[in-house]
Amino acid sequence: MLSIWAGSAGTPMETICFRRFFRYLPRSFMAKTSWVNRNERKRATVKKYAALRAELKAKKDYAGLVQLPRDASPTRVVNRCQVSGRRRAFIRRFKISRLTFRELASSGLIPGVTKSSW
């Protein structure tokens, strides 16, 4: 079991850049790049139509909402691990999957995370 110490302020450690830790992970953890790219396209579509969706929702124009692309809905965007691209077992606080978290924490690459013992 791993304990998470967020530091003195108690804020999540979001400033850690996990992209540089790619070399520490086995290739088996990596998702297909096509899935990661598809998710990025969905994020771009959500951002593009965000203002229009908010306007249509305020007017309660559901017929207009149906005319928008499906990927314009924010619920279609999936949280993915920043290191491996895995979508399951995602830890929001660190923005990585549990497998990646375990590997990085065990090797001491995540500051403030220690293995618990009692």
Image: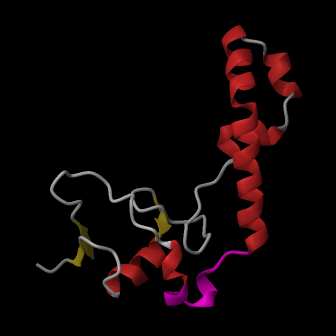
Number of numbered discs visible in the structure rendering: 0
Instruction: Report the quarter where the C terminus lies.
Output: bottom left
> Which is nearer the eye, 21 or 1?
21
Q: Position of residue 93 (x, y in %)?
A: 39, 57
2 vs 25, left or right, is: left
Identify whether 102 is placed above or below 17. Answer: below
**Residue drawn at x 19%, y 77% as measured from the top left:** 116
* Quadrant of the image occupied by residue 4: bottom left
Image color mode:
secondary structure
Q: Position of residue 15 (x, y in %)?
A: 39, 60
Q: Position of residue 99 (x, y in %)?
A: 47, 77
Identify whether 51 is placed above or below 25. Answer: above
Is 57 included in the stretch rendered in magenta? no
Instruction: Report the quarter where the N terminus lies.
Output: bottom left
Which residue range is magenta in the image?
Answer: 23-32
Q: Is residue 65 visible?
A: yes
Q: Is residue 73 visible?
A: no
**Residue drawn at x 44%, y 56% as measured from the top left:** 92
Identify whether 53 is placed above or below 100. Answer: above
**Residue drawn at x 76%, y 42% as measured from the top left:** 45
Which residue is situated farthest in the right direction here?
67
45 vs 91, left or right, is: right
Q: Position of residue 71 (x, y in %)?
A: 78, 42
**Residue drawn at x 64%, y 79% as measured from the top left:** 30
* Quadrant of the image occupied by residue 108: bottom left
